[in-house]
Amino acid sequence: MASMLAILRPSAPAPLAGRRARAAAPATARVALSSRSRYSSVRVSLGSEVAVGADALFADYKPTTAFLFPGQGAQTVGMGAEAQSVPAATKLFNQANEILGYDLLDLCTNGPKEKLDSTMISQPAIYVTSLAAVEVLRARDGGQDVINSVDVTCGLSLGEYTALAFAGAFSFEDGLKLVKLRGEAMQMLPIVRWLV
């Protein structure tokens, strides 16, 4: 489940530690290696930083913890296995089963790989497994504190939907319905699969 969620934290406490502000940065977040960063050799640049910086309401906004959610290609047979031991994570998979019409957790944990790799299956699988990873983290000692410290959520392509759901922009169910439609539409267009 670790591959379904990346957490960036500064190596030194930031002045606004403990202050909560979530922001989703769809399609504008990029991660670059940099030895000059206080983020343990990872720098996060937000394309919207200039616009936010120009707004007086956000002049002192300095995020300290980010959740980064993956896009298509992160799927692997066995993902979600850890979720079976966490009731809140299992609940997400059960809700997904009702919306999707198939047993997503079984498909994630047991495959077959060819089916899990299809766009219309992999996109809902990554979305649900990523949010289930948050529930697995929440169930661990100190996990809720990490979740509470999140200032920024962002994702790569499909991960933008996960970031928006985590940030509360829409419900888990509504996000899954969008991701399901997205995956089905992309599956129908062979050329699009090369662009994912």
Image (tube, rainbow, N blue to C red):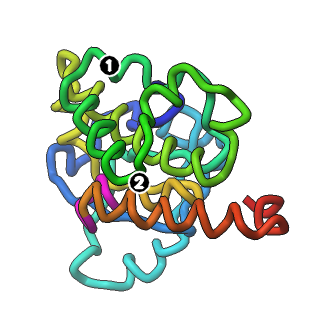
The foreground one among 100 and 51 is 100
Q: Determine the CA span between mark 1 and mark 2.
A: 20 Å
- Residue occupying image coordinates x 68% and y 46%: 118
In the rendered image, the vertical position of residue 166 relative to residue 47, given as above or below:
above
- Mark 1, Cα crowd under 10 Å, few <14 / some 14-19 / many 20+, is some
Residue hosting label 1: 84
168 falls in the magenta region:
yes
The foreground one among 110 and 56 is 110
- Residue occupying image coordinates x 17% and y 31%: 144
- Mark 2, Cα crowd under 10 Å, few <14 / some 14-19 / many 20+, is many
Q: Quadrant of the C terminus?
A: bottom right
The residue range painted magenta reads 164-170
Where is residue 188 drawn, in percent x and y? Answer: 71, 67
Residue 162: assigned label: 2
Secondary structure under tag 1 reads helix
Locate residue 94: give its quadrant: top left
Amino acid at the residue labelled 1: Gln
Where is residue 79 drawn, in percent x and y? Answer: 51, 25
The foreground one among 192 and 27 is 192
* Image position of 58 (left or right of 129): left
Q: Earlier in the sequence, mark 1 or mark 2?
A: 1
Closer mark to the observer between disc 1 and disc 2: 1
